[in-house]
Image: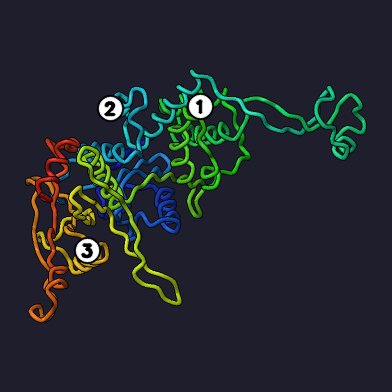
Amino acid sequence: MKRLRQYFEYDRINFEREAFTLDEIKSLQAFSDKTSYYDLTYGGIRFKEFVGVLQVGSLTIEVLPKIDRDDQEKGKWRNILLDMLKECRLLHPETTGFADLRLRANSILELYFELFLSEINDLLRQGLIKRYRVEADNQYALKGRLLFNEQIRENMIHAERFYTEHTVYDQHHQIHHVLGKALRVIADLAGESHTGVKAAAVLQNWPENDKLVVTEQTFSRFQLTRKTQSYQAAWQIARLILLNYHPDLRQGKTNVLALMFDMNMLWEKFVYNRIRSAAKGLGWFVSDQREYKYWKGDTGTKKLIPDILIELVDGRKIVLDTKWKRPVDDKPDDHDLRQILAYKLYFKGDHAYLLYPCYKKDSFCVDGKFEPKSYDDIDLVFRNEFTLKGGQMFLNLLDDDKLITKTAFAKMFLQFIK
């Protein structure tokens, strides 16, 4: 019987209190060796900064983001997570019937499964592409190149057969074999549910190759062409499923599928996408993860990588470092301050902000400045370098328990940097 449990990031889970089965406990304990999504505790686990979904046998665990620890509205935060995944292109809203699928799916994982099956059905309606491939086997007609060693070994007493290597033009190629493997995982994990039955039905007529071993290189070698453009969404979801599927874990009899996302990276990507959308009409240049080597030694180099760097039309530079957390009493910790100072100096930023989410209050800024030692004795130009224009920016990303629109985000952000 399928079960769904919902928790928040950094929640502590007690296995006995939550009635986890022995197989589920063993699988989660074994899976902890392969991942950093959670820590093992005495009699349970503690989630970290990752959000998303863990499928452990028949148990689906959703880990949701949350800003305010007193806010326990799981349905709201589930929808916010889905919207952020969609904004960051980790869901594909252009899929036919996305809104209907979102309402119908019982879990985030099931939504991914349904989106994948929707893409697969679209491909079937359009007609699966064919490719040339080389095949070596027995034929009753001489077709292609005769393989003499195999002919002697296989057909010594079968003069009517020919062991040949020949070219075939059909649907049995790697793209379909990889998608078929993802279909098999969905059918196995979803079981007798509506989603599982649909996946099993598609598999009956789908080109499959059970011996195919799928790795990261399988997906990195895939080159999108005009002919395979329609496969992009299905291919990306298949990659997400297959590279995060862990069957038959050590000590456990239950398979695990983990679709988890670093909430810090998700927040950074969300903010970057929103700012980039606003920048199109303002003439700004926006970049993310720009590297600067600030230290080099015999053992290697160290880099400064600010989250977002904005260059305005008037030449000013804004350095942003996003943080998915709420600092105590709205005061940044020492590490964050040192980090934003380094970014400001190395990238010569006119403004530098630590950018936090906020909730249940309007967006606001907390200005500040760095005070160097012997402030009055240093050169005036160098002193100005230490005057921090900016400080902390708290952005309310919600409007009536939904993500704010791109227009509202742009207006909110602009009011702090003029």
- The image quadrant that residue 92 belongs to is top left
User: Is residue 181 left or right of 313 when viewed as pictured?
Assistant: right
Q: Earlier in the sequence, mark 1 or mark 3?
A: 1
- Which residue has dot 1 on it? 200
Q: Confirm or deny contact between disc 2 and disc 3 (CB under 8 A).
A: no
User: Is residue 221 left or right of 192 when viewed as pictured?
Assistant: right
User: Which amino acid lies under the numbered mark 3 shown in the image of this protein?
Assistant: Lys
Q: Confirm or deny contact between disc 1 and disc 3 (CB under 8 A).
A: no
Could you say whether the residue bearing mark 2 is in a helix, strand or loop? Answer: helix
Q: Residues within 10 Å of mark 1 (few under 14, many from 20)?
A: some
**In the rendered image, is residue 7 in sight?**
no
Residue pictured at 30% horizontal, 23% vertical: 100
User: Is residue 33 left or right of 53 when viewed as pictured?
Assistant: right
- Which residue has dot 2 on it? 103
Q: Nearer the viewer, residue 12 or 277?
A: 277
Residue 309, percent from left and from top: 26, 53
Q: Nearer the viewer, residue 133 or 225?
A: 225
Nearest to the eye among marks 1 and 3: give it: 3
Residue pictured at 21% horizontal, 68% vertical: 338
Inter-mark Cα distance, 2 to 3? 44 Å
